[in-house]
Image (cartoon, helix red, strand yellow):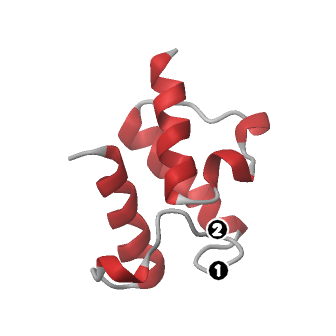
Amino acid sequence: MPAKMQIRQFILNNYLFTDDENKLSDSVSLMQSGTMDSTGILELIMFLEENFGIKVTDDEMIPANLDSVDNVVSFIGRKQAR
């Protein structure tokens, strides 16, 4: 399954409690929309590390990497390319 689909499913199931794909926009801020709080972001990081074989360092825990589905997918791509 593509990374974007896995991330979307994780967020939809664990934070929006639905499987309705229309409830989550790939470009909307997860924090500003109220979809996730700081604890949710930490859970997302654990999910990414377990499922994509990456390590998220403290300095990478920024909105540009983790605050939307699109940002997360781009971040994973950059991490896996190293």
In the rendered image, residue 16, in percent from the top left (x then y), is placed at: 44, 83
Residue type highlighted by circle 1: Ser
Q: Which mark is residue 21?
A: none
How much space separates mark 2 and mark 1, taking CA atoms? 6 Å
> As rendered, which of 49 and 71 lies closer to the eye?
71
In this rendering, the answer to whether 57 lies above or below 6 is above
Q: Residue at x 72, y 37 (%)?
A: 60
Seen as rendered, the residue at the extreme left is 1
Amino acid residing under circle 2: Ser
Element on which disc 1 rests: loop
* Local crowd size for mark 1, using a 10 Å CA cut-off: few (<14), some (14–19), many (≥20): few
Q: Could you say which is closer to the camera, residue 59 or residue 64? A: 64
Which residue appears at 31% of the width and 76% of the height?
21
Identify the residue at horizontal 32%, vertical 54% (top origin): 6
Give how far across and how far down residue 42 sits, in percent. Answer: 63, 56
Picture quadrant where residue 58 is located? top right
Locate residue 24, reporting x and y percent.
44, 75
Task: Please give the residue where the numbered disc 2 appears in the rendered image.
Answer: 29
39 or 31: nearer the eye? 31
Q: Is residue 35 left or right of residue 10?
A: right
Q: 3 left or right of 30?
A: left
Q: Is residue 22 above or below residue 72?
A: below
User: What number of labels is visible?
Assistant: 2
Write down the quadrant of residue 59 in the picture: top right
Label 1 sits on residue: 33
Asked if the residue under mark 1 is in contact with the one under mark 2, i.e. CB atoms within 8 Å, the reply is yes
Q: To which quarter of the image does residue 2 belong?
A: top left
> x, y percentage for residue 79?
53, 26
Residue 10 higher or lower than 6, as above or below: below
